[in-house]
Amino acid sequence: MPRAGLDTAAVVAAGADVADEIGFSALTMGQVAERLGVRTPSLYKHIASQEDLNRRIAALAMGEAGDAIGAAIQGRAGRDALRAAARALRAYVLAHPGRYAATLGFQLTGPDDLLALAAARSLAPFTAVLRSYDLAPADTTHALRALRSIFHGFATIEAGGGFQWSTDTDDSFEWLVDLVDLGLRAKPAE
């Protein structure tokens, strides 16, 4: 019989918290079970495998990040929306480095895959930001990839302690937002 109060969402949340503390690559079912005060076999009533847990953490992180970005851009457009979205993603990655790391490297199994749905949810706010720019519809995917690469790259390097220079990281981030905004404005719609 499953432990009262223990369900799939609780297991995934505990796994995400542990991943944030120790790093996603170090996460095991045993650590999640310990966090929840149960034996590891008890988790398998709610999660099929380590792979299943990892995919669910990735979906959770994508959804949370998308919600944070969506909330940040409400009522904003253009550079203000771009800046708010970039800051929200950065803040999320810095606050949740383990669960965010889970979002990389999975293959989607189809349009109904929980990761496909979560990915769409996480990209929707950036798609909304791009509507403020005069981009050709064919360039939207390229622009989304660029935004994700640029802001993901900065935030993950920062989260990993990769910026060791004396220049203020916040100043560098604002410089980056300005650079992206200028690039989006300079790209003519065809």
Image: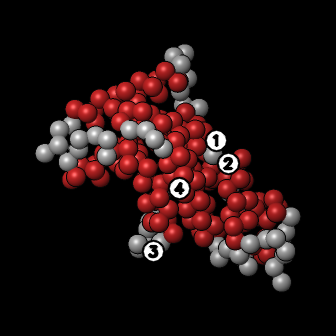
Tell me the SS state at disc 1. helix
Q: Which residue is mark 4?
A: 62
Residue 36 is marked as none
Residue 156 in view (yes/no): no
> Identity of the amino acid at label 4?
Met
> Identity of the amino acid at label 3?
Asp
Mark 4 → mark 1, Cα distance in angstroms: 14 Å
Q: Using the image, determine if residue 75 lies above or below residue 34.
A: above
| Sequence order check, earlier mark of 2 and 4 | 2
Q: Quadrant of the N terminus?
A: bottom right
Mark 3 → mark 2, Cα distance in angstroms: 27 Å
Q: Which residue is mark 2?
A: 20
* Residue at the front extreme, as displayed: 75
10 Å crowding of disc 2: few (<14), some (14-19), many (20+): many
Q: Are marks 2 and 1 in contact (CB under 8 Å)?
A: yes
Tell me the SS state at disc 3. loop
Q: Are marks 2 and 4 in contact (CB under 8 Å)?
A: no
Residue 112 is marked as 3
Mark 3 → mark 1, Cα distance in angstroms: 29 Å
